[in-house]
Image: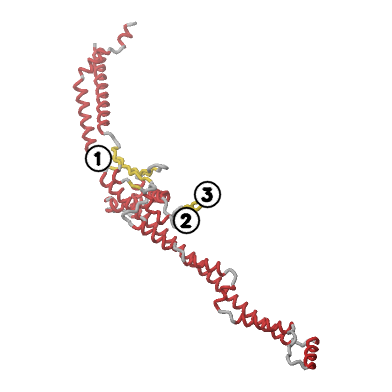
Amino acid sequence: MSSSQIDDEIDLIELIEILFRGKWLIGGVTGIISVIAAVVLTIMPTTHSMTLSIRSLSPQDMSGYAPLNNVAGISPPIYADDNLIGQTGVILAEDLMRAVRSDIEAKASLSAALLELDPFFRDFEGTSTEKAQALTKATNAFTFQRRENTSDFLVTETQNILLTRSILIRFVEIARASIRRQNLIAIANLSKSIEASLTYEIEALEAEIDNDKQTYFDNLGRKITILKEQAKIARALNLVTPSQNLSINATASSGAGNFQPANESSFTLGYKALEEEARLLEQRKKSDWKIFSPGYAEKAAQLRKLKNDKRLQRVETGLALSPLSRPETFTPAIFDTENILVEPVSNKPLIIIVVALLSGLLASIFVLFRHYAAQRNFISAA
């Protein structure tokens, strides 16, 4: 190895000695910078990540809606082997969870909570446009993480834990009230639909029965008129036949004491039958139309069924027994407001350690650079 190569190589022991001689400078610079970093980090407010867990209602949570969901005829039926075993229901956990997600994505309840609790918006002095822009920016700071078949999460970063916690709790209250109001409106519309449908069917069936009644009396009157007309014609055509005249004359000439008239002619029997039928028809009671109107029994049974329909009463009863009737118990999903996860975004001790290492490294480089610069100047002067 040449002497120039030996001179160019760095002596590790010499390097350690140089750094040891500059230990006070390195330690001082490292300590000062570390203290400054610690003070700055202590003064600076800590940014925290806050996570609100939201999960769908379980079958046990939905059991309170059973009296409402099991009302027959208000939702699609459920069959098993062609046997009706129940109804799908009108209040479903997946629908409630979908409503929660829609509310969060629309930012309606979040906006209302921010406007109500955040002092920045309560004391906002800008224009309405500027306030709307600031509100949009604030709501966009809340990130919604959707996860199928698991809990969803509403996440945000904040330097004011208490205020953000209050905003999240208020958001839940507003969202619950809004979704409850939507479902109550839907139930009210369902009741109105059932009532309108029943009223229409009852009125239509009653009109059909009234039409059958009027048709019966019209036909009865026409038939009686026709029968009487036919009886008049038969009476007018009641001529004594020659055989009948001969029979009568023979009986009279023999001087028989007991006169037996001959059999009545077909004309006589005909008009008497017609008159008797007309008389019987005229003697019918007004209520007999129900007996002689085809299909009346089926229509009457259907009308009774419609008038005895209990869906409206069952919907009202089911609604009264469900959590929807009590604002304090209704929830469209499980909001875990008691266990909002709070985590610091930055690790201050780790930052201080990194700053100390970097400052120590820079101070060491400075000491080495200063030593070799001084050595080079000495050699050049020599």
Q: Is residue 47 left or right of residue 200?
A: left
Relative vertical location of residue 241 with respect to residue 348 in this rendering, above or below? below
- The secondary structure type at the circle numbered 3 is loop
Q: Quadrant of the N terminus?
A: top left
Q: CA distance from mark 2 to mark 1?
A: 54 Å
- Residue 265 percent coordinates (x, y): 74, 84
Residue bearing mark 3: 81
Query: Which sits in the foreground, 277 or 338?
Result: 277
Q: Kindly report which numbered mark, 3 or 2, lies closer to the viewer in this rendering.
A: 3
Relative vertical location of residue 275 with respect to residue 293 in this rendering, above or below? below
Query: Which sits in the foreground, 3 or 222?
Result: 222
Identified by mark 2, the residue type is Ser
**Could you tell me which residue is drawn at 80 percent across and 90 percent down?**
250
- Residue 348 percent coordinates (x, y): 26, 33
| N-terminal label among 1 and 3 | 1
Relative vertical location of residue 325 with respect to residue 359 in this rendering, above or below? below
Relative vertical location of residue 315 with respect to residue 20 in this rendering, above or below? below
Q: CA distance from mark 1 to mark 3?
A: 65 Å
- Residue 114 percent coordinates (x, y): 31, 51
**On residue 75, which mark appears?**
2
Identified by mark 3, the residue type is Asp
- The secondary structure type at the circle numbered 1 is loop
Residue bearing mark 1: 45
Q: How many marks?
A: 3
**On residue 233, which mark appears?**
none
- Residue 339 percent coordinates (x, y): 29, 43
| N-terminal label among 3 and 2 | 2
